[in-house]
Amino acid sequence: MTAGIDKINFFVPPYYLDMKDLAHARNVNPDKFTIGIGQDQMAISPVSYDIITMAANAALPLLTEEDKQAIDLVIVGTESSIDESKAAAVILHGLLGIQPFARAIELKEACYSATAGLQFAKEYVLRHPNRKALVIAADIARYGLNSGGEPTQGAGAVAMVISSEPRILALSDESVALTQDIYDFWRPTGTEYPVVDGPLSNATYIESFQRVWQEFGRRYQKSLADFAALSFHIPYTKMGKKALLAGLASESEEEQARILTQYEESIRYSRRVGNLYTGSLYLGLISLLENSQQLQAGDQVGLFSYGSGAVAEFFTGTLQEGFTDHLRKNQHEALLDARIRLSVAEYEAMFSTELTNANLAADPDTTPFRLAAIHQQIREYRA
């Protein structure tokens, strides 16, 4: 029996900032952003967007009426929660019209939690093969204007339908997780922006990949040759490449070139979007599947998930027959191409707009789901 990703989709806000424009405004050489961290554009979210609106817009195109009746587990992975008590998944369950007899929960562990949700959903579906699960990663990565982390911001959501007859990627039971109590990135309750130790975060990311990769090979007698491609958590596109190069040090030049070629396909969308936190690995997976010319049914794909603090996991899946027929390449490219380019002044104004009913009413957004108003501390969404 199998379980895995049957459908997958991403959604990003309709605005972006060109990284060269940001570099010029901050008196930085544009190469530092476009080459040094590997980013070309950054998704910008208006005041009417939160994790609920983006998650709902990511999930809606995937769900048939049959899906809504079969889904009885809804999981949201996020580190941009809008409530300290009520789960975003509960609100999404209602907005999406999923049948009432379902569980709905929200998970947190920095950028890792969507992977935990995916693994939980896989195990649930294996036990209940006639049911389905919906897993959504949704986040807004914000570090503040003119801050050190500003060029690694972003926003968006990735939605996945998990079933016992996955048409895209069947997940394996082979995985290795690693937990370490490290303060490389954290956001104490009540603070607006995270606290980041950049050098420690980068070093921990790379070391975590090396440790789970080596342990995976030891446990399962697998090597790089067993994988057609590797997909990484991508807070910025050069980060995954640094870890990959560190892990490939003992491989032949031919093997390194083969995997690095696939890595470049996996970062195409991330270069245009920026950091999705919990969704970054899965945006990379979508980019890999939709842009690679080499992948085919039966190929093994390795996935490295990382969440600061820190939890990491390396796990695998097998591409299914006809998987390309169930991707959304044209829709994703159209979504990215239709976005509005902001000037730096417009970006700064949008970033600083306060969440008020007047500002929500003035927002011109026309997507299927948007935050319309807040009354008595209750968010009201237009569907």
Image (cartoon, grey):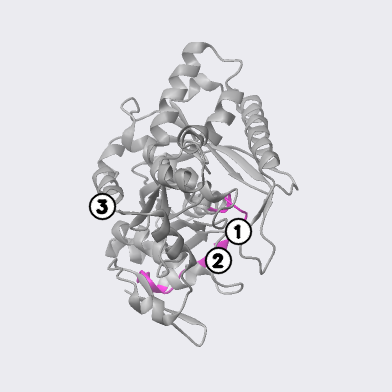
Question: Answer yes or no: do the residues labelled 2 and 1 have beta carbons within 8 Å?
Answer: yes
Q: Secondary structure at mark 1?
A: loop
* Magenta region, residue range: 94-114
Q: Please tell me the numbered disc located at residue 308.
A: none
Q: Position of residue 72 (x, y in %)?
A: 44, 65
First reached walking from the N terminus: tag 2 or tag 3: 2
User: Which residue occupies the foreground of this view, 208 or 4?
Assistant: 208
29 relative position to 368: left or right? right
CB atoms at circles 2 and 3 under 8 Å apart?
no
Q: Quadrant of the N terminus?
A: top left
Foreground: 227 or 9?
9
Q: Secondary structure at mark 2?
A: loop
Which quadrant of the view contains residue 298?
A: top left
Q: Amino acid at mark 2?
A: Ser
Amino acid tagged 3: Ala
Q: Residue tagged by mark 2? A: 81
Residue 112 located within the stretch drawn in magenta: yes
Residue 364 spot, x, y in % from top left: 29, 70
Mark 3 to mark 1: distance in Å? 32 Å
Where disc 3 sits, the SS reads loop
Say whether residue 116 is left or right of residue 93. Answer: right
Q: Earlier in the sequence, mark 2 or mark 1?
A: 2
108 part of magenta stretch: yes
Compared with 60, 356 (above or below) is below
Q: Which residue is mark 1?
A: 108
Viewer-nearest of labels 3 and 1? Answer: 3
State the separation of the CA atoms marked 2 and 3: 28 Å
Q: Is residue 289 above or below residue 150?
A: above
Labelled disc at residue 338: 3
Whether residue 208 is visible: yes
Residue 326 in the figure: left or right of residue 375: left
